[in-house]
Amino acid sequence: MLNRYLASGITATIVTAVLALAPAPVAGQSPQKAKSAAKTKAWTAPRTPDGVPDFQGYWTNNTLTPLERPKGLGSKEFYTDQEIADARKKEQQRLALNIVEGRPTEQGTAADVHYDFAQFGLDKAQSNVVWDKRTSLIVGPTGTIPAQLPEARKRNADIAAKNRGHEFDGPENRPLSARCIILGYDAVPMLPAGYNNNLQIVQSPGIVTILHEMNHSARIIPTGGQPHPAPSIGLWRGDSRGHWEGDTLVVDVTNFNDRNPFRGSSDKLHVVERFRRVDAGTILYRFTVEDPATWDQPWTAELAMTTTQGPIYEFGCHEGNYALAYTLSGARAAEAEASKKTSH
């Protein structure tokens, strides 16, 4: 049995350490806070040798702010300072308890047979967390993704129906993440998920490259005015073309294929991203999504990326990928067993 005094001492130490490491809220400031900040001495972004803002380094977009606003908050766009402080304290206490006593699970559930993320340093709270005062990453009074158009709902329902009952026929029927093609984290727009939310940005003249920790994929963004390829060419993460507007990197993303739908989108998806380094430790990332075949209006979200410690180690999703092979072999074994029963 774990000594209670030892546990309490460890917990106190962990909470103290997490409090010391946790960054202060940097995004989603109220207008009053923004005006106050504007009065302070203006910060100038460093430049690369070719004269553009220098975004290079290691970053994380890890946040606990949901993409869509919880229903109970209505039109409330920002939390108060006290609400943020309470949320941070609650999260730190949860992490401390997890590390000392292990993640609580319900016996017999899927979660019960999975390892404790905190045990391997994968709990979100063990990384730098951007504490955004926004109640949702989506900006505006509704804070939610617009309802899909009727034709989009039908399109997605037809796709689901076509694969229903065939989910284990072959690798092509499995989700893209199970096949190590796209894991969501390394898609466009760039949104955080459960863990491995770290990025490395490298720049050279006319090129910005973003390396994602998850799936170890590199996104290469030309900034020299190159045109998009022909509309008939569809790519898993679309085609990115960037340019500079002052200190802001604006990235226009088109040419998505229809096999990697973002929130039920179509191949007509169009994303415009804006990256702006607002201080030494923060890049503000804002994107606008439009797809006339899915939504009747565009919508915008915003989150901050904060500096983190490198390096980023390789994520070898394809190294064996035993889970995919075992899933399919398990399906074949289940089919053989069912066939035996029906033949008797």
Image (spheres, rainbow, N blue to C red):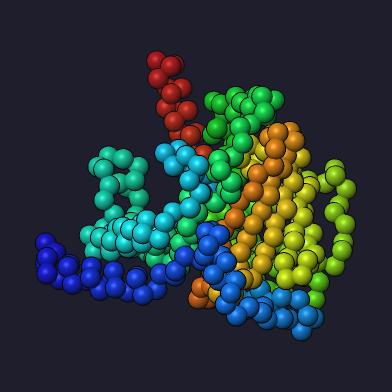
Point 31% across, 40% down: residue: 109
Above or below residue 7? Residue 227 is: above
Left or right relative to 319: residue 121: left
Left or right relative to 47: residue 6: left
122, 124: nearer the viewer: 124
Point 29% across, 73% down: residue: 16
Q: Quadrant of residue 243?
A: bottom right
48, 137: nearer the viewer: 137
Above or below residue 287? Residue 9 is: below
Asked whether residue 315 is in view, the answer is: no
210, 305: nearer the viewer: 305
Quarter in which the C terminus is drawn = top left
Left or right relative to 264: residue 250: right
Percent position (x, y) of residue 61? Answer: 54, 62
Asked whether residue 231 is in view, the answer is: yes
Q: Quadrant of residue 294?
A: top right
Percent position (x, y) of residue 17? Answer: 32, 74
Point 65% across, 41% down: residue: 261
Point 66% across, 73% down: residue: 55
Above or below residue 71? Residue 126 is: below
Left or right relative to 117: residue 77: right
Quarter in which the N terminus is drawn = bottom left
Q: Quadrant of residue 51?
A: bottom right
Percent position (x, y) of residue 147? Answer: 61, 32
